[in-house]
């Protein structure tokens, strides 16, 4: 599935040409994921009016759609936190943690995957990896940071019958 088909299937509309997509895997109950709310809000503000689409997904089997809706209201994200049904997107991108970011360029190629930045405490951030990756992709430059290993809470996947 290419990025256009992914966006269309997930959001009901294809992304415009040239737009990059940031998929953030988040949890409503993980304290580390929740500690990133302000930094995620800063990303929304930084890229407002730019060709950047944000998709927020909750892949955890132990969190409900209602919890996702309540969380979106509480943190006032401008886009809703949606359930990743059957962890389809988490499986597709091999996401393991919340929070974890996947950056797709206009062609649907993964250009960055990993941590949003390198520190749980915002005062200790030295590498703002996701921001640097978005800026590079928008500028049609190589991504300067290899995927930083995501840290946080492990994704609680839906168990399948074997």
Image (tube, rainbow, N blue to C red):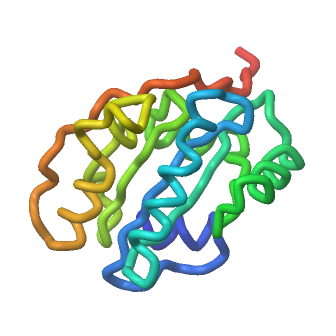
For this orientation, the residue located farthest to the front is: 123
Q: Is residue 44 shown above or below 144?
A: below
What residue sits 89% from the left and 48% below the top? 66
Q: In the displayed structure, does residue 137 sit left or right of residue 45? A: left
Please name whichever residue, 158 or 134, is drawn nearer the observer in this view of the structure: 134
Residue 73: image location, x then y, percent: 80, 59
Residue 98: image location, x then y, percent: 55, 33
What residue sits 51% from the left and 53% below the top? 40
Residue 80: image location, x then y, percent: 70, 62
Q: Is residue 123 shown above or below 156?
A: below
Q: Is residue 155 shown above or below 1?
A: above
For this orientation, the residue located farthest to the top is: 162
Q: Is residue 136 shown above or below 144?
A: below
Quarter residue 138 falls in: bottom left
Q: In the displayed structure, does residue 93 sit left or right of residue 29? A: left
Please name whichever residue, 157 or 50, is drawn nearer the observer in this view of the structure: 50
What residue sits 34% from the left and 39% below the top? 117
Please name whichever residue, 135 or 23, is drawn nearer the observer in this view of the structure: 135
What residue sits 36% from the left and 84% below the top? 17
Quarter residue 136 falls in: bottom left
Q: Quadrant of the C terminus?
A: top right
């Amino acid at each position: 599935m290419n990025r256009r088909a992914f966006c269309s299937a997930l959001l009901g509309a294809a992304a415009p040409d040239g737009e990059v997509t940031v998929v953030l895997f988040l949890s409503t109950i993980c304290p580390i994921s929740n500690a990133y709310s302000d930094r995620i809000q800063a990303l929304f503000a930084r890229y407002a009016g730019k060709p950047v689409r944000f998709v927020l997904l909750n892949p955890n089997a132990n969190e409900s759609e209602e919890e996702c809706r309540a969380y979106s209201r509480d943190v006032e994200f401008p886009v809703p936190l949606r359930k990743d049904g059957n962890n389809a997107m988490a499986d597709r991108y091999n996401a393991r943690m919340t929070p974890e970011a996947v950056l797709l360029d206009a062609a649907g190629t993964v250009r960055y995957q990993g941590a949003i930045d390198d520190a749980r405490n915002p005062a200790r951030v030295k590498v703002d990896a996701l921001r640097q990756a978005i800026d590079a992709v928008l500028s049609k430059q190589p991504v300067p940071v290899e995927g930083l290993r995501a840290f946080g809470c492990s994704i609680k996947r839906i168990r399948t019958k074997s």
